[in-house]
Amino acid sequence: MKVINFMGQRKLAILFSLVLLTVAGASLAINQLKWGLDFTGGTLVEVHYSETADLNGIRETMDGGGYAGAVVVSFGTDRDVLIRLPEGYSDSEGAAILALLQDSFAGDVELRRIEFVGPQVGDELREQGGLAMLLALGLVMLYIAFRFQFKFAVGAVVALVHDVVITLGFFSVMGMEFDLTVLAALLAVIGYSLNDTIVVSDRIRENFRKIRKADPVEVINISLTETLGRTLVTSLTTLLVLIALALFGGEMINGFAIALIVGVAIGTYSSIYVAANALLIMGVSKEDLMIPVKEGAEQEDLMP
Amino acid sequence: MLNRYPLWKYLLVIVVVLVGFFYAAPNLYAPDPALQITGESSAQVIDQRTVERALNALDEAGIEHFGEEIAPDGRNALVRLRDRDVQLRAQALASRALGDGFIIALNLAPTTPDWLSNMGAQPMKLGLDLSGGVHFKLEVDTQAAVERRMEYYENAIKRALREERIRGFVAIDDGNRVVARFRDEELRERARRIVSDNHPELALDRVEEGDSWNLYAAMTEQTLNEIIDYSVNQNITTLRNRVNELGVSEPLVQKQGRNRIVVELPGIQDTAEAKRILGKVANLEFRLVANLDAPASEKQRFEYRSEDRAGMSEWLERDLIITGEHVSNAQASFDQNGQPNVQISLDGEGGTLMSRATRNNVKRRMGVLFIERKYRTRYEMQEDGTEVAVKIPFDEKKLLTAPVIQQALGAQFQITGLDSPMEASELALMLRAGALAAPISFVEERTVGPSLGAENIRLGVKSVQMGLALVVVFMVLYYRVFGIAAVIALSCNLVLLVAFMSLIGATLTLPGIAGIVLTVGMAVDANVLIFSRIREELRNGLSPQMAIHAGYERAVATILDANLTTLIVAIILYAVGTGPIKGFAVTLSVGILTSMFTAIMGTRALTNLFYGGRRVESLAIGKDVVGGASA
């Protein structure tokens, strides 16, 4: 089998990752994230008009009704309208807005949803979300260090942080709203990217033990080549369903699907380049893998 | 012989899949829109005549209905409707026909056939984002509860020192501490002994400040937690009672975190009405029982609240002694003779009022009234000929108890002469429910209209179908016969996932559906791993049978590692997430577990059936597009 020289391009890959990380970091610092209602608190009303909605007219109605800061946008179709009030409003505004809109429109205004989130809830959620992410990374690192080896754990976590930061950066650059479902998607990205990285690491470990005369770069190239088919096929099937979800899942699940699509794409790249690269930088060698794990020895017995 | 499963393994796979189909089946039966009729009080029995009245009203309006049933205990009845659009109108008609005293709730009645439901098979519950309804998050102001308790301690200590003639200055220090200042150490020491005897739950601290000898009394962490838990639980009890009034078929009232309460009301659209009922305040009134010769203008008659004394009543004076706002606690307990009693604590002002009122009225009786805000419905004809239901609020006052005053009462007294410990705890519960609970406020509210819920279901189902179709086409094209095995396994995986979720009573939400879609994409990963491995082994020159064997053996360790780490993440999601996120985490974790079973054991069984135990020249497993099979 022809071994692809992945690691020959490792300098380029590092540069590519650094550029992406810098852009993401800069955007997160300057633009920050467009936090959704779940995190900022405030009131959101989604209504369905029986005829095409006149956004400007609705804005005027809102201004006239004393909601000067309201954001009025169409949501999915030209009959669905989303109105957002920034934080500081009370929990009774939703129903009041609905009545105001119905009064100023001859046809039917149908309530789709009202959401009110108090400011303190939002703050806590942000804290919890960050905590969940750190906890996930920490536990995963422990598990890999236990099952594989410390350097693999560092490699995996570097890859995960890489994926999460770039996905966050994507949301920041595109100005897409970051809500609870996107946070869930991000945690799913951690799970997915990890899955990929572990499959590759598993093969690297196996080959380090199997191939006697080869330097680390070669071993990693062989392992990556061997797993490439699987990596691409799994990413493809996952992307297929995610695209189906993004196209047919409706507006409420759109951010979730987009976050996962970006995350899976980046995760596929990082499992090939970032984790393996990190291993090389840390100087992984045969000795790292020979002594410890007992399961490894049993696996070797299965070789033909 | 390679690649042959023993019979029991085939049987295991078949049994698991069949059980899966069985428990997933209820989800295929669409529920009927229905009305649920219950009585406002638990004593109200729903009989055939009541139901007939409601049905007649529906018949007159031409609303089709069927399959009415009355629960064996007569507590509720169910009327199924043909059409979901008429549900709201049917509800209005039925409540009109039955009048006050009955609650008509919108419901989706499962249509699970008896042979399924007898085995415990039930459809999945739908989350609010799919069924439509209201979600509230309320926050209990626990600080207020703590402050009330501090005031109580301040007064209790003041009184105790006064009785012992210890001179000192007592005040609340900073909300969580009471400080007592004394002139010398001896006074402080005597005070300390009294306080620690009376209130062993307080942590005492001695500090000298200039020429003042100070004693600080603070609540221990444990007492503080108890007060907070108590005030939250008290609110939950009250909210449960009120939610029942709203007429919701499956409400949820649940504690979340330290001081939050989540209330979910499926099917409710009118949030204003819901909030009014949830936020209303019950109350208590303490009044003297009127003397027999009192003029009618000075007394009022009240009925007893409990069912045992239904129809009995007492005359009470019009003047009231105190209201529930002054009651800081009520606890069922036993006196030194082992007789059940209820201990009542009042705040300082309440204590003063109580002692003033009872001092000269020993041997008379005192009535305790429980006041609830209720609504009467009146139907008004509007100008355009339509009829609207108008809810008119009124206070319903009923007598809880009327014990004899044995001596002058203060801030703490007890009600004795109760028949049983159960009666005591019931009375204490009612007193607490009537006392002003720690204030609550709404911190989160989400309303999903029924049309959005229905649309979310439709979109969710469509994306699962599309995702599944895409993966099926790809897998069969890329892996041929093995692809078919993987696709069968994937379908079984979906069935098992749905079955498991139905069985554990998990709630399906929109993110939950997204989790299912994601599972479809990721579940084939295990098979992809196995199949790539088999292809590799074929390239390495192994015979087809050996390749299948080695491929499965070697891939399993990798699959376990990869899935276990994903499971870790899913569990963290479940632990820290709320509401919809939890739904996603549940489907993801269940999906991982079922996919390991179907992808490893399920496909192995299929491949073994197809290829195992015979001579095979080549495997229909497709070719690697990348990596090249040239070597």
Image (cartoon, rainbow, N blue to C red):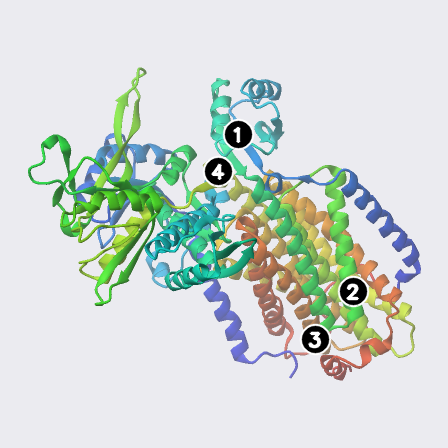
Residue beneath disc 4? B447
Inspect the image, locate mark 3, and give the three-letter code of the amino acid beneath it.
Answer: Val
Residue B524 placement (x, y as % from top left): 65, 61
Q: CA distance from mark 1 to mark 3?
A: 63 Å
- x 89%, y 70%: residue: A216
Residue B137 placement (x, y as % from top left): 48, 44
Q: Are marks 3 and 2 on the same chain?
A: no
Secondary structure of the residue carrying numbered label 4: strand
- Name the one closer to the observer, B588 or B63: B588
Residue beneath disc 2? A154
Residue beneath disc 1? A47
Question: Which quarter of the image is occupied by the N terminus of chain B?
Answer: bottom right
**Marked residue chain, label 2:** A
Residue B35 seen in render: no
Q: CA distance from mark 4 to mark 2?
A: 44 Å
Task: Report whether B55 appears left or right of B438.
Answer: left
Inspect the image, locate mark 4, and give the three-letter code of the amino acid beneath it.
Answer: Thr
